[in-house]
Amino acid sequence: MNTSSLRGIYKLPVAERIARLEEGGWLDADTAARLRDGHHVVSVGAADRMIENVIGVFGLPFAVAPNFVVNGRECVVPLVVEEPSIVAGLSSAASLAKRSGGFEVENAGSLLIGQVHVTGMADPDHAISAVENAKSELLAAANAVHPRLVERGGGARDIELRLFALPDGSPLLAVHVLVDTRDAMGANLVNSICEAIAPDIAAVCEGEVALRILSNLADRSLFAARARFALDAEVSAAIALANDIALVDPYRAATHNKGVMNGVDAVAVATGNDWRAIEAGAHAFAAAAGHYRALTRWTVADNGDLLGEITIPLKVGTVGGTLSSNPAAALGLALTGAQSAEELAGVMAAVGLAQNFAALRALATSGIQAGHMKLHARSVAAAAGASGEQFDQVVKELVASGEIKDWKAREILADVQGAKTEEPDGSAAGKVILLGEHGVVYGRHALALPIPDAVHVRLTATDALSHKLPEKYVKRLLAELGVEDTNWHIDVASRLPFGKGLGSSAAVAVATARAFNAKLGLGLDVAAINAVAYEVEKLAHGTPSGIDNTLATYAAPMLFRNAGGLQYDALDLAEAPPILVAWGDETGRTDEQVAGVRKRHAQATAHFDAIFDEMDRLSRDGADLLVAGQWQELGALMNLCHGLLNGIGVSTPALERMVSLARQAGATGAKLTGAGGGGSIVALCPGTIDEVREALRQGGYNTL
Ligand code: NAD
């Protein structure tokens, strides 16, 4: 059996969460690929066939809550909801419940009530006995409406009667037809039954049909879920008290039940069910005793554990409705693993109880607001443009400020960025290879762009050398520079991620060399700085091509090659290229990738050489296109180069995903950049940079 404990899934980027679900057996490869590519979403055409006056489709976050065990079955629960904290609350409640065996759910059948309302009866008592007498004929007529439903084991089961007086005193008979709709929610099935048998009922009652439609007070489809939570007795008592309050105070009960429905509705939407029907039923049932009250009961066991129970009407479907037209709903339903509508309703009942537990525990302990605010701060920080290393700092300061507002996030972000841009003692550029990586190791040309002003270094005099860089790296640098006075603190501020193929180590070497050159008046010229950095690079990359340190030093677009010595032509561009760089968690090791290619090159030398020749041509032609600003054509060459890099075995599924997201969002060219095996991609996005950035961020990737 698959385990629903997807430990640490909340820390992963979106693409890797999907991979975890695939590995765990919760998604098949096709579904995972559709999710990754965003192809699971209902199309505008399909939406146009669902309702009237469609102008588009509306997105909502689609998430999963792990850790659920319902009647002994592990399940991952799909949730579609825009409110922060619900998913986290559910995951943690389910995990705690799992330790005591999970959720037990029971139901005594699942029937939907169809109503035929009859008025104008001269003798209501006679009408009641006439309907009782005609019951079997009426049920037979009802079952003749949907023979397929009867074949599936469903159909009309019973007829019940309720007599009312209308406000003018005249009698109203509500004739209830109880229908087993099997795996369908059943609204249309039952409505058509009501419409078909209403004339017979009116005739039997000697009255007139007023209305004929299902009831959403689905109290013949009640689901009871129970769970035990091992808690501190004091917390258990506080939760039980919170529940008691919601049993007597309807104002509190409304908020209490809203929490329950936070979970139930999110599953309903994710599985294509009619959440308005479920809401209507739940609240009507909550008021059935005569006053509106909590749907749950919480009590404290003798050992201090908390015992929870919910009873809720849930008439849901695993067939029908929008399930066949909305691929996201079908995906959500498949994730639940539910084999029947009753099993799905059981999961929803468990989710309702779990969500109520999460809300009450937060209320009874630390207060619901703190957790909420942290999650809210994360979305505000992201919207303000915080990313990478700055993200956590902006979130932290935002929460501390108590002003979780967009303007505040922007202010904090500006401060954080400002702190990094304080006048440095030395600075250097990062690099992004546009065309020709790996070919360059075999003497072919490559084309690269600088990432200007990417690393800043400041030196402060102290009484001992201090820094956060690798020790041997600093030692070599100081030796190459001939620095003897080492009582300095080296402070590095970098906007480059480390190990993502963006030349971060060379940029740090160049910026640090420049800082010492300036502080100590070493009198080194640019070429000497470049040479020092090249020596240090050998520590990081074994036999580097020299491109990283050259770009870091000269910070200019370049076409270069290393044929027994680095040769480069700095390029003068007509306009800055619309470039976006993106990376995920995967890190590639240049030395390993170069060694891998070397091995494969030895196995098929002539073919690999032909590829390197083609890379050479792409780089040289690409340089002309770059200078002229011909982005469409340059993009096409980048795509070709990516194909070749994939061909020589340096791409990864994560890089392919990023490339495909970028191209789908409108990049004219997208390819891996650097050695591969992880790291970054570069995308050329004339006029689409915002769309591509957004698509990559939504995929869980960082962008620059
Ligand atoms: P439906 O109209 O799609 O009917 C279900 C279909 O599935 C039937 O044709 C049935 O024959 C078929 N089916 C296949 N396999 C089945 C199985 N194993 N068990 C049962 N049926 C099976 O859907 P529905 O459930 O009758 O109606 C639900 C829809 O009605 C929802 O979209 C809802 O929004 C809407 N609706 C709701 C209300 C309300 O709640 N007040 C009113 C009107 C319409």
Image: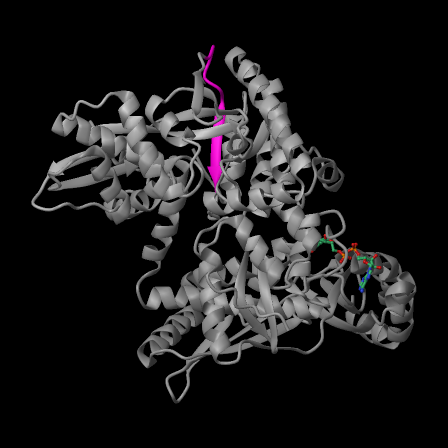
How many discs mark residues in the rendered view? Answer: 0
In the picture, which quadrant includes the N terminus? bottom right
Write down which quadrant ligand 1 falls in: bottom right
Q: Look at the image and tell me whether residue 292 can be seen.
A: no
Seen as rendered, the residue at the extreme front is: 564
Vertical placement of residue 245 versus 60, above or below = below
Q: Which residues are magenta?
A: 573-583
On screen, residue 17 versus residue 420, left or right, reads: right
Give the image location of residue 389, x and y in percent: 34, 43
Could you say which is closer to the camera, residue 482 or residue 143? Answer: 482
Q: Position of residue 655 (x, y in %)?
A: 56, 42
Relative image position of residue 486 (x, y in whole percent)? 13, 41
Query: Up-down: is 587 above or below 407?
Result: below
Q: Quadrant of residue 268?
A: bottom right
Q: Which residue is found at the position 65% from the left and 58% from the top?
A: 27
Image quarter (top left, top right, bottom left or bottom right) of the C terminus: top left
